[in-house]
Amino acid sequence: MNRIPRRELVRKGWHVLPGILGAPIIVYTPRWVTLLVVWFFAILYTLQHLKLRRGWKFTVPIADLSYRTMARDDEEDNFLGSFLLWITMAIICTIFPKIAALSALWVSTFGDCFNALIGQLVGGPRIPWNRKKTLIGSATMFAVSLFALMASHRVLGLDYSLQFLGGIALAAAILESLPIRSAYDEFTVPFSTALLIWLAYGGPLLAVTW
């Protein structure tokens, strides 16, 4: 077993907060409330990212605090990961039905969190196409994503096919394992999850209500 640094635990704590606090908003409030909240945070994190990129000298509420506690080593002059997560979730909540939004949120936040923590804690064999990732981490991503997808369907009272949800979880695990900049999976994982859910179930796009 490896030791996980305290900063990494704090960073992952911030990472799962949208999944914990955002889910009740998606599930229980009208769509306009969800959009108001998610676009508010998307704007905050966009400002934080642009501030760092352009050297602006002002403090962005909430986003500045989270940057100081959870920024990656490659985010000295940017906040790309959180910026992409919030912009992607704002787009998803604007375009797709509720089940797609909730599924995307939970797969992205919980799947990525436990994938990273278990991968660092246990270690073990590396993925052939990405030596920074472990097999146990990707397996954890798959398992947690599958559980998250099942939970989102149960919360909304929807039936599901375990094989179909397993396919979506597998797609999320594969996308997360790709040898690209780690921040990019804050877009690829949630958006692909929402898109696959919508392609399977259909439903109106850009609807005024959930």
Image (cartoon, rainbow, N blue to C red):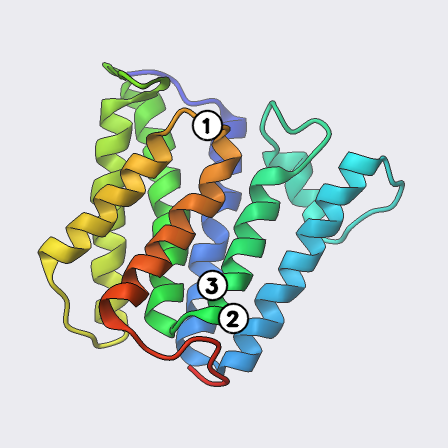
> At which x and y percent is residue 201?
24, 71
In front here: 25 or 200?
200
Q: Amino acid at mark 2?
A: Thr
Residue 62 can be seen in this image: no
Q: Amino acid at mark 3?
A: Ile
Say which element carries label 2.
helix
- Residue located at (36% from left, 47% from top): 110
Residue 74 can be seen in this image: yes
- The residue most toward the right is 57
Is there a contact, CB below 8 Å, between mark 2 and mark 3?
Answer: yes
In the image, taking residue 146 as reference, residue 77 lies left or right, namely right
Cα distance between the residues tagged 2 and 1: 27 Å
Of labels 3 and 1, earlier in sequence is 3
In the image, taking residue 83 as reference, residue 161 lies left or right, namely left
Task: Tell me the tag on residue 180.
Answer: 1
Classify 4 as above or below 141. Answer: above
The N terminus, quarter of image: top left
Cα distance between the residues tagged 3 and 1: 22 Å
> At which x and y percent is residue 195?
35, 59
Classify 36 as above or below 140. Answer: below
Disc 3 marks which residue?
92
Is there a contact, CB below 8 Å, between mark 2 and mark 1?
Answer: no
Figure disc tally: 3
Q: Amino acid at mark 1?
A: Ile
Task: Tell me the tag on residue 94.
Answer: 2
In the image, taking residue 88 as reference, residue 138 lies left or right, namely left
In the image, taking residue 155 as reference, residue 43 lies left or right, namely right
- Residue located at (24% from left, 62% from top): 151
Q: Residues within 10 Å of mark 1 (few under 14, many from 20)?
A: few
> At which x and y percent is residue 104?
38, 57
